[in-house]
Amino acid sequence: MTTRELRLAIAHRVVSQLKDVGKIRLQKLCYFLQESYQVPTKYTFKMHHYGPYSEALETDLARLRLTGYVAMSPDPRGYGFHISPVDSPECEWLEISNEYFRSIESALRLFGEWSPSKLELAATIHFVKNLLPNESTIEVLRRVKSLKPKFTDIYIADVYRELEEMHLLGQERV
């Protein structure tokens, strides 16, 4: 199994499980799968306008679309895109993604209903905390606020606490 096959299998499994997902949600769910659930996709995430973002994941999404495994259509109200499964995956993709089935199910159970903006904030908090593991909570919250001024201090602190309660800050989830 190559890293590319793993990436495509995991992305397709997430899209298939959710039936309709936007690009932001898909990026953040794949971020948490890699960073908190140890799914070894080896994506490089960098801070972007909507939080951690991987160009390679965007490329994989384009591959899935061009090969007919997913459909992507613009939201009629102008809010991003809708990604949905079209074709069943390759047999070997099922075998690959089955190895990570529990991790995917767990992440989708935790985050599957979260709005894209809450996922954006949660992933940003996680990203900053991983970059600055020895910083105080107050400093992490201050830095997140500087990156995401559209969110209130209280909301940022609430999402931070939720991530702590889920054991996703400073600890690996299994």
Image (cartoon, rainbow, N blue to C red):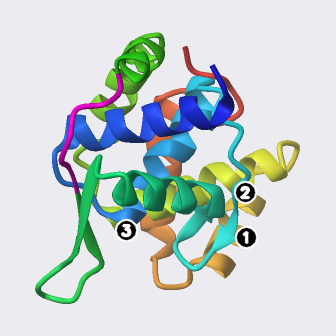
The range drawn in magenta is 84-90
Q: Main secondary structure of the magenta part?
A: loop
Report whether 146 appears left or right of 37: right
Q: Which mark is residue 122?
A: none
The type of residue carrying mark 1 is Arg
Q: Which residue corresponds to the image point at 71% horizontal and 32% vertical from the top-left? A: 170
> Could you say whether the residue bearing mark 3 is in a helix, strand or loop?
helix
- Neighbourhood count class around disc 1 (C-alpha, 10 Å): few under 14, some 14–19, many 20 upward: some
Judging depth in this view, the residue of 60 and 52 nearest the camera is: 60
Please report the residue visible at 55 percent of the width from the left and 84 percent of the height from the top.
149
Residue 141 at what x, y percent from top left?
Answer: 65, 63
Q: Quadrant of the C terminus?
A: top right
Q: Is residue 160 above or below residue 5?
A: below
Circle 1 residue = 143
In-image side of 168 versus 119 (left or right): right
Three-letter code for the amino acid on which mark 2 is drawn? Val
**In the image, 103: left or right of 47?**
left
Residue extending farthest to the front is 67
Closer-to-camera residue (140/110): 110
CA gap, disc 1 and disc 3: 17 Å
